Image (cartoon, grey):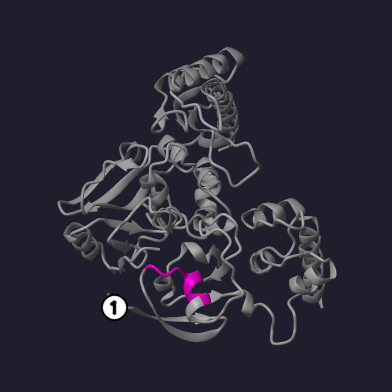
C-alpha cells in the first residue's frame, strides 16, 4: 500500500508529508510532523484534547484523516502564540491558573481562540456551550471560563484602540 | 487504525464507479464523525474509504426551484450559519446543531447522520418532518426518495451497492408553515437523545392547523412518522384537548427499549411531552411566518 503525499498549510507554513490513509490528522501532527502540542485524549471525538482549526472551524483532529488536509489550512496550538508573544487566551490561562495537569489545555486554547475569532463578545453561557466538546478532569472548568471571558474583554479593548 | 485504502473522487460518476467496483467493503466518508470512531473501535472494517467532499456540490446549500438543496457532506456549522435556512426551517437547523460538540459540528453531515442510521440521530426527525427527499447516485443512475426510506434499522440503510446520497432537498415552507425539534438528554449537551421529536405544522390565517407531520426518534429501531399525531393536530388550534390527543398519539407510537439512558415507560412519557412542546413552538413560529 503506497503512502499519500499531502500538500497543506499548517500554522501558516506550506507543509508536505507522506502518510498512510488510516493515519488521523492527529497521528500525522504528532508522529510525522513533531507537532506534539495536540493531545490524544479519547480518539473518539468526545474530549477535545486534539482540537485544531481547519479552514476556520474547530474540529477534532482524531476524527479527520491526514489525507483530508490536502489543500486546506490547519492551525494547531503551536500556531496560537506569535513567536514569544502569547495570545490573550494563553496569558489569561496563566493568570487565572486555568490549568493543572495541562493535558486538556491545548485543546481548550485552540477552541477558545476560535470562539473569540468568531464571536468577540460571547456570554458566559455561549462560551460554555462552545467549549462543551473540551473536557477537563482537573480544574472543574471555573477558572477556564474566567480566563476565556477575561481574554475576550482584553481582546475587545485591544480591538477598540 | 487498521489499514485502509482511500480515494477522493472529484465527480459523482467517479465516486459511483469506485463504490460499485470495490471488491471489499467500501464506506463513504463525509465528516467522519461516526465512520472514524467505528473504524478505530473495530466495529467497521472497510477496505476502502471514499471521501465525497471533493465532489462539487456535495458541500454547500443552494436554493433551486422551490427547494433548499443541501449537499450531502455539508458540515453542521454551515447549516447553522445559513440564515435563510434557519429562518425557513429552524427545527431542521436546531436538530442538526445538537449533534455533538462545536468540533463535531465542524465536520458532521446530514447524510452521515441519516446513513449511520442510529435511531437517536438528532438531525433526522426534523428533516423527515419537513418532508425532505434525498437524491441518490448509483450504478443505475440517480433516484430521489423520501428521506425516511433510508434508515431500515439500527445501522442499516436501504442504499444498494455503489449508491450514495449526493444531496437533500427540503421544500421551501408555505406561508404559516414552520417546525421545531427538541430532544431529551440527561446532561445539558454532548449526549445521545433519549427521545427526539421533530414537528412541522402549517396553519391557516386563523391559526388552525391544516397540515402537520410529527416524527419521533430514539423510541423505536428507526424514526417513527406518527400519522395519528398529525391527525390530532389537523383541523384544530393548539388547545388542551388537542395537546392531550397529540400526547396520547405520540405515546402510542413508541416501541422503545430499556437501557441505561431511559426505561420504556420514561421514554414513552417523554415522547408525549416533547410532542406537546415541539407543537407549541412550531405553532408559534408558523403563526409568525
Q: Position of residue B242 (x, y in %)?
A: 55, 15
Please tell me whether residue A23 belongs to the stretch shown in magenta: yes
**Above or below B282: residue B35:** below
**Nearer to the camera, B78 or B172:** B78
Dot 1: what SS?
loop
Magenta stretch prevailing secondary structure = helix
Q: To which residue does mark 1 refer?
A: A2
Residue interval drawn in magenta: A22-30
How would you rate the neighbour count of disc 1 (Cα within 10 Å): few for under 14, some for 14-19, many for 20 or more?
few
Residue under the point 43% across and 59% down: B31
Q: Position of residue B249 (x, y in %)?
A: 47, 17
B18 relative to B85 in the view: left or right: left
- Locate the C terminus of chain B by quadrant: top right
- Locate the N terminus of chain B by quadrant: bottom left
Q: Residue furthest right?
A: A95
Q: Position of residue B67 (x, y in %)?
A: 38, 47
Q: Which residue lies furthest to the left in this view?
A: B140
Residue under the point 48% across and 36% down: B175
Residue under the point 42% across and 58% down: B40
Amino acid at each position: 500500500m503506497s503512502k499519500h503525499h499531502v500538500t497543506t498549510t499548517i500554522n501558516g507554513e506550506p507543509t508536505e508529508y507522506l502518510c498512510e490513509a488510516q493515519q488521523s490528522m492527529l497521528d500525522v501532527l504528532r508522529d510525522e510532523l513533531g507537532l506534539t502540542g495536540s493531545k490524544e485524549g479519547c480518539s473518539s471525538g468526545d474530549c477535545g484534547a486534539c482540537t485544531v482549526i481547519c479552514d476556520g472551524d474547530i474540529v477534532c483532529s482524531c476524527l479527520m484523516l491526514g489525507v483530508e488536509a490536502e489543500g486546506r489550512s490547519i492551525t494547531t496550538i503551536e500556531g496560537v502564540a506569535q513567536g514569544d508573544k502569547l495570545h490573550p487566551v494563553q496569558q489569561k490561562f496563566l493568570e487565572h491558573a486555568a490549568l493543572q495537569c495541562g493535558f486538556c489545555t491545548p485543546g481548550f486554547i485552540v477552541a477558545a481562540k476560535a470562539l473569540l475569532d468568531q464571536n468577540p463578545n460571547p456570554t458566559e453561557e455561549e462560551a460554555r456551550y462552545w467549549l462543551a466538546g473540551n473536557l477537563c478532569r482537573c480544574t472543574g472548568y471555573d477558572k477556564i471560563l474566567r480566563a476565556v471571558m477575561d481574554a475576550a474583554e482584553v481582546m475587545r479593548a485591544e480591538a477598540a484602540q | 487504525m487498521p489499514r485502509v485504502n482511500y480515494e477522493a473522487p472529484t465527480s459523482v460518476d467517479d465516486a459511483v464507479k469506485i463504490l460499485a467496483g470495490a471488491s471489499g467493503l467500501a464506506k463513504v466518508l463525509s465528516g467522519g464523525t461516526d465512520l472514524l470512531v467505528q473504524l478505530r473501535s473495530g466495529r467497521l472494517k472497510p477496505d476502502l474509504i471514499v471521501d465525497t467532499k471533493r465532489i462539487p456540490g456535495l458541500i454547500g446549500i443552494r436554493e433551486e426551484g422551490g427547494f433548499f438543496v443541501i449537499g450531502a457532506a455539508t458540515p453542521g456549522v454551515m447549516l447553522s450559519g445559513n440564515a435563510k435556512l434557519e429562518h425557513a426551517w429552524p427545527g431542521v437547523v436546531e436538530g442538526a446543531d445538537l449533534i455533538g460538540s462545536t468540533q463535531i459540528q465542524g465536520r458532521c453531515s446530514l447524510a452521515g447522520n441519516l446513513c449511520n442510521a442510529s435511531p437517536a440521530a438528532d438531525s433526522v426527525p426534523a428533516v423527515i418532518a419537513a418532508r425532505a427527499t434525498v437524491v441518490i447516485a448509483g450504478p443505475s443512475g440517480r433516484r430521489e426518495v423520501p428521506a425516511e426510506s433510508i434508515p431500515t434499522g439500527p445501522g442499516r440503510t436501504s442504499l444498494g451497492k455503489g449508491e450514495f446520497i449526493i444531496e437533500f432537498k427540503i421544500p421551501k415552507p408555505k406561508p404559516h408553515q414552520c417546525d421545531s425539534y427538541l430532544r431529551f438528554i440527561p446532561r445539558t449537551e454532548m449526549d445521545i437523545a433519549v427521545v427526539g421529536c421533530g414537528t412541522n405544522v402549517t396553519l391557516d390565517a386563523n391559526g388552525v392547523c391544516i397540515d402537520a407531520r410529527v416524527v419521533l426518534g430514539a423510541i423505536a429501531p428507526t424514526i417513527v412518522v406518527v400519522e395519528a399525531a398529525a391527525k390530532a393536530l389537523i383541523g384544530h388550534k393548539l388547545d388542551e384537548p388537542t395537546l392531550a390527543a397529540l400526547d396520547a398519539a405520540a405515546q402510542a407510537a413508541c416501541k422503545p427499549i430499556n437501557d441505561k439512558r431511559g426505561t420504556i415507560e420514561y421514554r414513552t412519557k417523554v415522547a408525549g411531552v416533547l410532542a406537546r412542546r415541539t407543537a407549541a413552538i412550531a405553532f408559534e413560529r408558523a403563526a409568525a411566518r
